[in-house]
Image (cartoon, coloured by chain):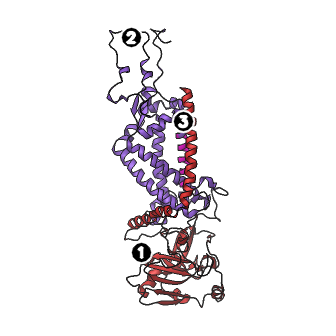
Amino acid sequence: MNRTWGLSRRTALIGAAGAGGLLLTGCDQLSRSRSFIRVMQTAERLNLKTQRLLLGPQTPLAPEYTAADISPIFKANGSIHPAGDDYKRLLDNNFVDWRLTIDGLVAHPLSLSLAELRALPARSQITRHDCVEGWSAIGGWMGTPLNLLLKSAVVLPQARYLVFHCADNLGGGPGGLYYETIDLVDAVHPQTILAYDMNGQPLPVHHGAPLRLRLERQLGYKMAKYIMRIEAVEHYANIGGGRGGFWEDRGYAWYAGI
Amino acid sequence: MASDEPPMAEDGLPPEVQPSPPVAPSPPDARPALSAAPEVVHRHAAITRITHWINVACITVLLMSGFQIFDAHPALYWGQKGADFDRHIFAWPGGIPHWATIPAWQDLTTGRIWHFFFAWIFLINGVVYLAYGLLSGHFRRDFLPTRHQLSHIGESVWEHLRLKFPKGEKAKSYNVLQKFSYIGIVILLPLMLATGLTMSPGMNAAFPWLLDLFGGRQSDRTLHFIFAWLIVGFVIIHLIAILAAGPINEIGSMITGRWKVEPEPHPVPPSQPEAAQ
């Protein structure tokens, strides 16, 4: 009897080790299979639909914090200084020549200088920035509510997304300029602002000067820095890699609410 | 496989254990009845067995893809915030080795895709299991320790430390330590889901109280990590117990539902000391 148990124990151990090995190599094969990844990516759509359902029409706000909670040093990630002469010229002149363009599917395209943006009603918020990598930092932001600009530009009914065209070229190569898309549900949320101040100072270069997006109910990679132009579009399939953003083209979820 | 198994005890006792009439004395060479026919009981319901194996797959993938996600920033903090310049409470230099991550190379994107897909399966599977356990009375009947068990918990701990498990009639219901660990895992797995969801900025807007419950975004991430290792601990003890109790019978019972009761070694009746050879 004891012999049998000993044998079966050994068999079970070998079996488990074998199954484990198969599982590991199997998962790696599947990770390389584009079609399997695409099947698993259907969960992203489910995440979006579920969170939209839970968030509901009342557009609850992301938690806001106090000045005492602000991170002493706010980690800067991704692009921290756009290359190229165009950005250098703007920076050297303290962004006096910079203009934000809002165009695409809008009735009244806008072109605004930094001074004009600063003259508009602003919103201040102290919020938590969650990076997809896992860390969090808290910062104070002031900027123009995006909804305000969209109202004056009058977004056309067929528009569904906003494309943020940025000055940085994180991916390298021609036409590799950073871009990001959000939908109009998030665009009109009261905490969605175009921030020009951080912790009471003009936005520093490594955090996206002169203007960055704050999209408080999603992860950090959605919050485009160095914004030059906002374009209203119906689809984003023909822009960049077609998945709706610099990181999305590299496999990250378009909806980064989780 | 089934052919060499004894008939199941479902249609009454097998002939060997039918009590013989007292008037007919047994011949001296009668076979010891119980050892010839190990009793087979129906131990696990089909829903338990199916959800168990789906859970095995989900927890394996969630753990290993979770290691991948952790490796993107292998440090833990307490409170709302925490990054390179803040004080961490734990750091794993170099991160968890990639033989233990899905995929087996640094790839946060693909790790997240695995994690969230299997999180949905884990959620649906868990809801089915919990609904079954609560509605069928399985949890109440099989997981709640009896008063007698609670008062004899010391003996049970001692038996388990020596990897000695109950046999015969006592083995048909869960042991008190087994009950506690199953109750623990039934609480721990939903906590894993809750701490996972609390890391979502979207969920934070919808249910800000979740952040308060787990002490902030980074505390929550730390708890998610700790709970994951508690699950690993449960699995290790679970596997040791299965190996010690007889892996074929134990694993087989989670596949077929049928479990062989190892008979209690009964003392030789003193009246016939010479009966056994």
Q: What stretch of residues is rendered in magenta?
A: B223-238
Task: State the SS at label 1.
Answer: helix
Task: State the SS at label 3.
Answer: helix
Task: Pick whichever of labels 2 and 3 is earlier in the sequence.
Answer: 2
Residue placed most toward the observer, B206 or A254:
A254
Position of residue B215 in the picture relative to residue B144 (left or right): right
Residue under numbered circle 3: B243
Q: Which amino acid does the dot numbered 1 rest on?
A: Val
Residue under numbered circle 1: A185
Which quarter shows the N terminus of chain B?
top left
Residue A246 visible in the shown view = yes
Q: Spatial distance from mark 1 to mark 2, Cα to Cα?
A: 85 Å
Q: How many marks?
A: 3
Do the residues at pointers 1 and 2 share their chain? Answer: no
Q: Which amino acid does the dot numbered 2 rest on?
A: Ser
Chain holding disc 3 = B
Residue placed most toward the observer, A102 or A75:
A102
| Rendered shade, chain B | purple
Do the residues at pointers 2 and 3 share their chain? Answer: yes
Residue under numbered circle 2: B26
Q: Where A7 sits versus A59, above or below?
A: above
